[in-house]
Image: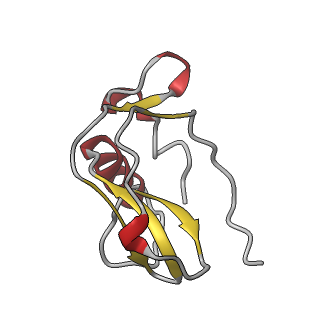
Amino acid sequence: MDWIRAGNASKWGSENGGKITIAPGGPRVVEPLGNMAAVLMFASSQLCWRHEEIVRAGASHDFEDFQPHFSLTKADVDLTKIEPYRGKIVLGPEVFEEVKAD
C-alpha cells in the first residue's frame, strides 16, 4: 500500500486538524455485523468516498461492501432495547500504520 498515493481526507470535507464530522440525524441503526453482536451503522458519503480512494491506492479489505459503523459489542444484547445514537459524530485525524495480524 502506498500511503502517499492515498493522499489525505481533506478534499473529502475534513475539518481543520484532520477531523471529519458526521452531522446529527440521518439513517442510523444498531444491528449485528460480521462477528459483532451490535454495531452502530450510519450513513457517510465522506467515509465511503475515502474508503474507495484508499482502496484505489492499493489497500486491501476483507468485506465486499463498506458500511461506516462503530463496533459496540460481541456479547449478546437485546437490540430492541437499544436506541441508535443520533447526535453529531466527530472523528479524529486518520492514522496510517501497518495492520497487525494478531
| The residue positioned farthest toward the right in the image shown | 102
Q: Is residue 81 left or right of residue 35?
A: left
Q: Is residue 56 left or right of residue 94?
A: left
Residue 37 lies, with reference to residue 94, above or below; the image says below
Q: Residue at x 46, y 35 (%)?
A: 8
Residue 68 place in picture, x, y as percent: 37, 56
Q: Residue at x 53, y 64 (%)?
A: 71
Residue 83 place in picture, x, y as percent: 38, 55
Residue 55 lies, with reference to residue 38, above or below; the image says above
If the image is split into quadrants, where does the N terminus sit? Answer: bottom right
Residue nearest the observer in this picture, 20 or 31:
31
Q: How is the image coloured?
A: secondary structure
Please tell me in which quadrant of the rendered image residue 23 appears: top left
| The residue positioned farthest toward the front in the image shown | 81
Tell how many labels.
Answer: 0
Residue 101 place in picture, x, y as percent: 72, 77
Residue 88 lies, with reference to residue 95, above or below; the image says above
Residue 31 place in picture, x, y as percent: 37, 72
Residue nearest the observer in this picture, 99 or 80:
80
If the image is split into quadrants, where does the C terminus sit? Answer: bottom right
Residue nearest the observer in this picture, 91 or 74:
74
